[in-house]
Amino acid sequence: MQIQTYPDGFDLLLDGRLVLRHRSDAPCLFIGQGDARMDMYRGNFDIEDYVIERTPLSHAEVSGTGDEFEVSLCAAPGQPARLTLVISGSHCDGVIFFNSLDPSINRIWLRVVAGKNEHVWGGGEQMSYFDLRGRRFPLWTSEPGVGRDKTTEITFKADVAGKAGGDYWNTNYPQPTYVSSRRYALHVETTAYSAFDFRQAGFHEIEVWAVPDRIELTARPSFPGLVEAISERFGRQPPLPEWLYGGAVIGLKDGSRSFDRLETMIAAGVKISGLWCEDWVGLRHTSFGARLFWDWQANEDRYPGLPQHIAELASRGIRFLGYVNPYLAIDGPLFSEADAAGYFAMDDKDKTALVDFGEFECGVVDFTNPEAAEWFAERVIGRNMIDFGLSGWMADFGEYLPLDVHLANGVDAKLMHNAWPTLWAEVNARAVEKRGRTGDILFFMRAGFTGVQKYCPLLWGGDQSVDFTRHDGLVTVISGALSSGLLGNAYHHSDVGGYTSLFGNVRTAELIMRWAEMAAFTPVMRTHEGNRPRDNLQLDQDPEILAHFARMTQVYVHLVPYLKFLVAEASTRGLPVQRPLFLHFEADARTYAIQDVYLYGPDLLVAPVWQSGKTEWSTYLPEGSDWIHVWSGRTFAGGREATVAAPFGQPPVFHRAGSRFAELFAGLRNL
Amino acid sequence: MQIQTYPDGFDLLLDGRLVLRHRSDAPCLFIGQGDARMDMYRGNFDIEDYVIERTPLSHAEVSGTGDEFEVSLCAAPGQPARLTLVISGSHCDGVIFFNSLDPSINRIWLRVVAGKNEHVWGGGEQMSYFDLRGRRFPLWTSEPGVGRDKTTEITFKADVAGKAGGDYWNTNYPQPTYVSSRRYALHVETTAYSAFDFRQAGFHEIEVWAVPDRIELTARPSFPGLVEAISERFGRQPPLPEWLYGGAVIGLKDGSRSFDRLETMIAAGVKISGLWCEDWVGLRHTSFGARLFWDWQANEDRYPGLPQHIAELASRGIRFLGYVNPYLAIDGPLFSEADAAGYFAMDDKDKTALVDFGEFECGVVDFTNPEAAEWFAERVIGRNMIDFGLSGWMADFGEYLPLDVHLANGVDAKLMHNAWPTLWAEVNARAVEKRGRTGDILFFMRAGFTGVQKYCPLLWGGDQSVDFTRHDGLVTVISGALSSGLLGNAYHHSDVGGYTSLFGNVRTAELIMRWAEMAAFTPVMRTHEGNRPRDNLQLDQDPEILAHFARMTQVYVHLVPYLKFLVAEASTRGLPVQRPLFLHFEADARTYAIQDVYLYGPDLLVAPVWQSGKTEWSTYLPEGSDWIHVWSGRTFAGGREATVAAPFGQPPVFHRAGSRFAELFAGLRNL
């Protein structure tokens, strides 16, 4: 970090990049006060800020030399300083510490210098837009919404039914970190509500609804180096478990019938590594239909003799996975235990806060209480799940911390809301670690925030609609993988066939097949029956789908040697398995805004068919390599668009000419 | 106006009412800078403000004595003043002049003291909410929207089709003036975009996107006195023309067939004062259907021999009315004339700005050019319309001034946009006045803004949907009449049967009949065939509707002696014909938020049936009088709710016991 002072301001440089430019008539920092209304409706939020004050801090006084500077800021010369920045760090890694001198300040807006053709990525796991430039992104963990496009009928209906339609920026996993095409990353260390506004030509504006602890800046000469540094900062995932390489994880929630259905799939040639039954805890029947029973232990009624089944599957190399979330239903035995111990978040009247999840109420285990977190990790996950024999689970939710509860650590729930996904991940990771099963047990989460990287071994892209829509369908998973991947989440996957079926929207054979084609080229291939299994096509209902799916699991297994190489790269360098094209083709700026194509490791380019009714597909191939279409063996030049036939079973995938895995990739043609 | 100074601030009192309270830790004024994005889509606007600065002006220095004070304001002691207020006026009428000392300021926010149980009304013609408390109201003339309720399918479809769904605050006629239940009115003299925010408990916040010229305050001991003062301030309408008292104005746009259809109505006993044919200018055929030809002169093809028809009707006491708007279609002869004279608003390239109205383009006559305004008044309205024989017209539009045109007066179109309805009204009024026909020719407008009162003799409530919906149906007309009436618009009316039929929404017999029942108790009873006459029921298509309508016109004519009394009251005292209950029952605070019932003058209470499927209707009757149900003669006590039978033809109407018109009202029972 380098600071240059001028009579009326200063410039801050990071490894030669101008990052902050402050002049008295163009200040870089604004402070003030807001009074926000924040209402939650089952994980969807209606938030509106009333900005009472937004004062430009026009006058800056810089002191210090060498490695640490202090910038004292006020509205005008002669006024007392309202905020100081302490800036320190090395040439290419810097930290700006914020120190408020005025307790009324609860909003800051920082302008970071932006280039005209600059691209920005990140912001957590962004489902609609990978390149964030030109839009504003509030960063607040929530349901992502159903439809997520205010021009669609489904979004409208979801909004009317429960304020649940969402918008382009809603995500289970936001993170106030971005990566710039100027080859630096900026991270805001705060759990407060924040927003990145990339709509202005000359600056990015960072808004935080608190004085943040600090802003961290990291520059590297190349994108891979930058991603590696980011991964080091936020923590690396353990490698994928060996057992996973056996094939797909099959999601069924059909009680003990699930085992029979699994046999049908095996008989059809499906390669299987695990059976995932989220209904292992039993069901609750509501007027909305069957829901899971939110008390985390095996249900003997729904899965009689489950331990024997688990052992039998294990003997054939197939693991059994379950489900958990951070709530406890009031009518389950764990609730009483936690309640007696005082492990729940409290309400205004100092009673256990109860959250309505639709005809049943739950307590929120207070993970800011170390004893409660330890109890959940040991008593619930350790004993009821790991010791019982689960090899993994969906660690669902994390986005629903109500804003009016009282927490053990005394911090405002509005400031803990974003922190919750990471606390939830930590509870899961600790339980696994205590049993010495890190790298063997695989749990997966949709919610995230800063630091989740360190604890959560696998993201899943959340609850897409069962369709090909631009903002809630198959294609959104790619953006989710690429954006979260840049921030150090090496492993991403999604529900094959999508999840959310509402308002008559049901999945088609085509959707399941296109999704499976993509999933074969992701680190984890896992199916889901969806929220309404009976109304929606399942892969074992149609021999054509099942045969296609079996073929795609064979593709997945065939690629395991390459996947193991990618896992090693993730472990050593922090590079995500799914990568934006520019990560390895930085010289080709045409790749910077591409979000429907990805590199699967350095050598494969995957362009999933994400629209219906297609028989061929076109994709841009980066300049700097020739590309071999894996199904035809045909060579295409980089730097231009290629069009290939895309029949079912042959997703548009290319490998880099000269790859050391070329022989393996060529083998795909023989499957 | 009285000012009391304190060591850290001041209080401003208006006839004993605390209006402004300024303390250094709770300032009443904030200033700053915004950069708004304002996009227009055929009269619907997408507006978003980026507030760059919002600085509390915490430090105030008051000087002056007696009748004039100056308040010098800055952010902190020792800082130069950024704005001064000059406050002057009598005990109960005051003016706050704004004087900016900083050219960067383009936003102000003023906090006015609010009482806990205070109600506020006004804001122009507000269609959704009469009592404005608890909501924010942007004040910007625009299309009101179709559906105007984000939870309805029609609003959703209108939004998707053309950003045309609207919301509760969208109105053709906004005005930055409100009336408080604390018996004072506040008016902001500005044409800039502004907003009244009544959501806070302790203050109202007035936001203006410019430094306003001034804010005017008026207090009176009683509501009628206050309304009278407001009417004096903004100007009074001429009395309604005598010919109108003959009955309803029938809207037909069926070319020369309109005359035959009129005869059918007359034969059915309909009392008629005028025939209004908006298609008198001829049609243009587009892919959306038939539109009017926007060149303002009689069309001989569609209305052959129109002068003879007009004379024939006049001999029977029936006037003929037409249609005009402030645009000229590029393919009409008037366009060339205006273009040659340079009467149009110009675009960025200094060429005539053309606005697309859907398969045809128009020029915008620049009313800031006195010659252009005069030309439109004399050449277009005077010669083509008045001299031709029209006795009135719909003076449509006024809300569409594009924000990127260049105007003759050199003022930014963003600042002239709100001024346009009043300029448009003035052009019409001047044309009428020049012919000496004020009080005889009746034009009616939907658009409005400050000062429209002085020029426009009659408002019409705009384009309601053909339904009973809460935010775009029959009931909204009542709120429109009451809110605009408080601000000095004595005369209001609406399209019997509504206007907008889109997305399969068509009118029912019930809707037409309920609307006619209300219209009989408004100063002008006028029908409209709607935007899609062929798809929608017309009153002459069904003998039952026609008979019902005939009866309601007889009710209207029967009440003329009373209506004339109300017109006299409007002329002398500025009281609107349709009045909120509290205007005459101020002691009964239960009336303050009622918006679906009105007083028709001092002695009649009208509670229109505004929902479908009703056979009886309940309404609150104000305390302080007994009330006689006009159809049954039954007496009801005030201060409680009354329920009456409401068959078709007998709208729920009550007269005040002891009214000097009691005999007239009793006569309604014999119709």
Image (cartoon, coloured by chain):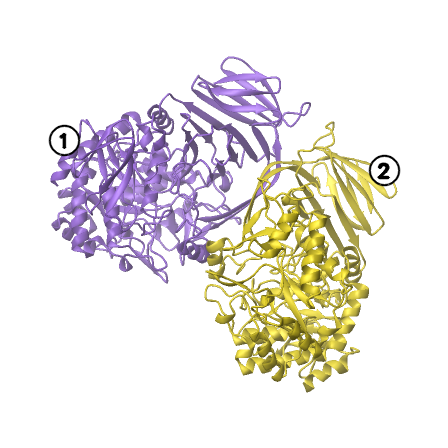
Chain colours: A purple, B yellow
- In the rendered view, tell whether residue A371 sits above or below residue B504: above
Q: Residue at x 63, y 80 (%)?
A: B270
Mark 2 or 1: the one toward you: 1
Q: Is residue A626 left or right of residue B638?
A: left
Task: Name the chain letter of the residue that bears numbered label 2.
Answer: B
Q: Amino acid at mark 2?
A: Gly
Subunit bearing disc 1: A
Mark 1: secondary structure: helix
**Residue pointed to by mark 2:** B64
Mark 1, Cα crowd under 10 Å, few <14 / some 14-19 / many 20+, is few
Task: Using the image as rendered, state which of residue A467 and residue A593 is in the foreground.
Answer: A593
The amino acid pointed to by label 1 is: Glu
In depth, the one of B158 and B128 nearer the eye is B158
In this rendering, the answer to whether A276 lies above or below B629 is above
x, y (%) of residue A366? 43, 42
- Determine which residue is flagged by label 1: A663
Q: Which residue occupies 35% across, 33% down?
A: A453
